[in-house]
């Protein structure tokens, strides 16, 4: 089992979109058993990307607080095959590192191939906890200067923790004002593992509750996201013609 913490220096870079689509590609395309933990407890959106609008009886917060078993908070998405442990947005919720790591340890005994963690943006204590609990840290940024600047701080923290780092350049419009990938790689001293272009269909897919890799499977963004999933399992994705 591999634990992947998906992070970003700031909001608005498409971190949760990458999370939902990476999980979907691993499950739907590559037939891996995947569960997503929504650790963005102050701004919980991952379930909306999967079309989950109903009231939730149990969430990740209930599990971490010991008020529910892990199995009580798993919701299966029939379209993607992804299992989701959602949260409900709360300004007072927090994640205890010891309890989060204990939960992941218990899940390691289960059948899951991947635990994908959607973290809050920024550098708060919760983000540090998630990075410590992860085997791999995937950092999402756009090529815009403020986003790259904040992503550099996340990468520096991940390096101190000696984590395997995956840099994803998202929402690329190929405009003159955007930083070039090679410039970003120099700033990070890390290779970019995937460049995902801006896709006008992504907001439409979120509104439909169906990740873009299924909603528009032949789009450039979908293909890039499936290649990203393939890179995590050491495979190559070749789009069907």
Image (tube, rainbow, N blue to C red):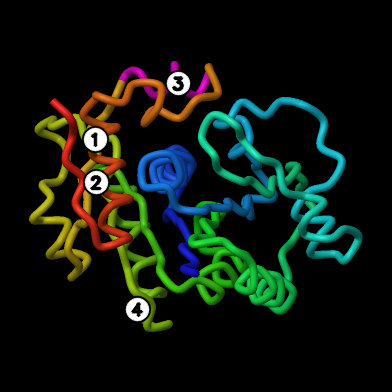
Q: Is residue 97 left or right of residue 58?
A: left
Q: Nearer the viewer, residue 145 or 33?
A: 33
Residue 167 figure quarter = bottom left
Which label lies toward us, 3 or 2?
Answer: 2
Residue designated by label 2: 227
- Under circle 3, the secondary element is helix
Q: Is residue 170 left or right of residue 90?
A: left
- Sequence-earlier tag: 3 or 2: 3
Q: Mark 1 to mark 3: distance in Å?
A: 15 Å
Q: Residues within 10 Å of mark 1 (few under 14, many from 20)?
A: many
Residue designated by label 1: 223
Q: Mark 4 to mark 2: distance in Å?
A: 24 Å
- Sequence-earlier tag: 4 or 2: 4
Residue 72, image x, y percentages: 82, 51
Residue designated by label 4: 159
User: What segment carries the magenta color?
Assistant: 200-207
Residue 201 figure quarter = top left
Q: Mark 1 to mark 4: distance in Å?
A: 29 Å
Q: Nearer the viewer, residue 31 or 68?
A: 31
- Under circle 2, the secondary element is helix
- Sequence-earlier tag: 1 or 4: 4
Residue placed at 30% from the left, 41% from the top?
225
Which label lies toward us, 3 or 4?
Answer: 3
Labelled pair 4, 2 in contact (Cβ < 8 Å): no
- Sequence-earlier tag: 3 or 4: 4
Residue 2, image x, y percentages: 46, 68
Labelled pair 1, 2 in contact (Cβ < 8 Å): yes
Residue 217 figure quarter = top left
Residue placed at 18% from the left, 30% from the top?
240
- Sequence-earlier tag: 1 or 3: 3
């Amino acid at each position: 089992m591999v634990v992947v913490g998906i992070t970003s220096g700031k909001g608005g870079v498409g971190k949760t979109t990458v999370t939902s689509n990476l999980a979907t590609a691993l499950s739907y395309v590559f037939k891996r058993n995947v569960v997503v933990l929504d650790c963005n407890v102050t701004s919980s959106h991952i379930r909306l990307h999967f079309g989950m609008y109903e009231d939730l009886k149990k969430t990740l917060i209930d599990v971490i607080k010991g008020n529910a078993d892990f199995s009580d908070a798993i919701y299966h998405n029939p379209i993607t095959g992804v299992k989701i442990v959602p949260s409900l947005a709360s300004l007072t919720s927090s994640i205890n590192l010891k309890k989060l790591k204990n939960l992941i340890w218990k899940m390691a005994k289960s059948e899951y191939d991947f635990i994908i963690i959607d973290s809050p943006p920024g550098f708060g204590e919760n983000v540090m906890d998630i990075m410590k609990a992860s085997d791999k840290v995937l950092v999402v940024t756009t090529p815009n200067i403020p986003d790259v600047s904040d992503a550099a701080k996340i990468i520096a923290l991940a390096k101190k923790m000696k984590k395997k780092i995956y840099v994803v350049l998202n929402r690329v419009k190929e405009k003159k004002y955007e930083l070039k990938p090679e410039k970003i790689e120099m700033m990070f001293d890390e290779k970019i593992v995937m460049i995902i272009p801006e896709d006008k269909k992504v907001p439409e897919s979120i509104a439909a509750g169906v990740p873009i890799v299924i909603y528009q499977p032949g789009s450039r963004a979908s293909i890039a996201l499936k290649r990203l999933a393939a890179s995590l399992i050491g495979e190559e994705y070749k789009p069907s013609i």
